[in-house]
Image (cartoon, rainbow, N blue to C red):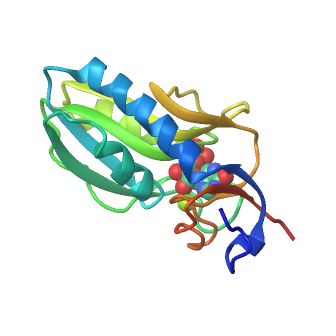
Amino acid sequence: MNTDDYLGKDVEAILHHETTIYARLDELALKITEDYRGTEITALAILHGSIIFMADLLRRIPLPMQFQSLNVSSYHGDTESSGVVRFEHDLPDLRGQHVLILDDILDTGRTLHAIRKRFEEEAEAASVKVCVLLQKRKERAKEVEADYVGFEIDDEFVVGYGLDYQGHYRNLPYIGVLRQG
Ligand code: IMP
Ligand code: MG
């Protein structure tokens, strides 16, 4: 991977190259396929962060599937979570469906906690599981667990492969630590 590119200059260290990500996605997809065999999944992508992860993961799962998305924001552009989770629209109709929530990263846990709460209050889904590409090793502000985790990472601000800093860097093909300051 040639990292001497325009965007790569802002990346301090590469945590996971494209090839490592793909290998891990193969494993995750196999596990999900085994777990859901015989059921139709409704994949619910949390936008925008999960978009690239979602596209690569879902194409590896050869099961019947529906797709929905939810626009939720919590960061509002900084590298520290604001603590406020904002739903940009209502939940889609997920009644009786086996929902697999896909998110980019489990950090403080506030986003997934708020989504789970909302689900319990109004979704009437048949089942709900969570799959995240990344999970930070840290104490969470809200207790929430993911059923499927791509990679555990240290508590650093990362970008690429869908993850952004102020809307930028999502198109980097790898996951890297953002150079600060
Ligand atoms: P949480 O609510 O604190 O768990 O954060 C969840 C959301 O914050 C994620 O879906 C990301 O959009 C964003 N986020 C948290 N950590 C990072 C990071 O290291 N890089 C980029 N975005 C992050
Ligand atoms: Mg974000």
| Residue 70 higher or lower than 128, as above or below | below
Q: Quadrant of residue 90?
A: bottom left
Relative to 138, 72 lies left or right? left
Q: Position of residue 149 (x, y in %)?
A: 52, 31
Q: Position of residue 14 (x, y in %)?
A: 72, 54
- Residue 84 shows up from this direction: no
Residue at 44% across, 29% down? 27
**Quarter of the figure that contains the C terminus:** bottom right
Picture coordinates of residue 23, whole percent (x, y): 50, 38
Residue at left offset 69%, top offset 81%: 6
159 or 109, which is in the foreground?
159
Question: What is the quadrant of the N terminus in the image?
Answer: bottom right
Residue 178 located left or right of residue 97: right
Q: Quadrant of residue 77?
A: bottom right
As drawn, the residue found furthest toward the right would be 181
Q: Establish if 127 lies above or below 168.
A: above
Residue 55 on image: x %, y %: 34, 53
- Residue at the extreme front of the image, as rendered: 1
Spot the residue most to the bottom: 6
Q: Nearer the viewer, residue 145 or 121?
A: 145
- Can residue 119 be seen? yes
Rendered position, 116 above or below 87: above
Horizontal side of 96 relative to 78 (left or right) equals: left
In this rendering, the answer to whether 15 lies above or below 123 is: below
Q: How many marks?
A: 0
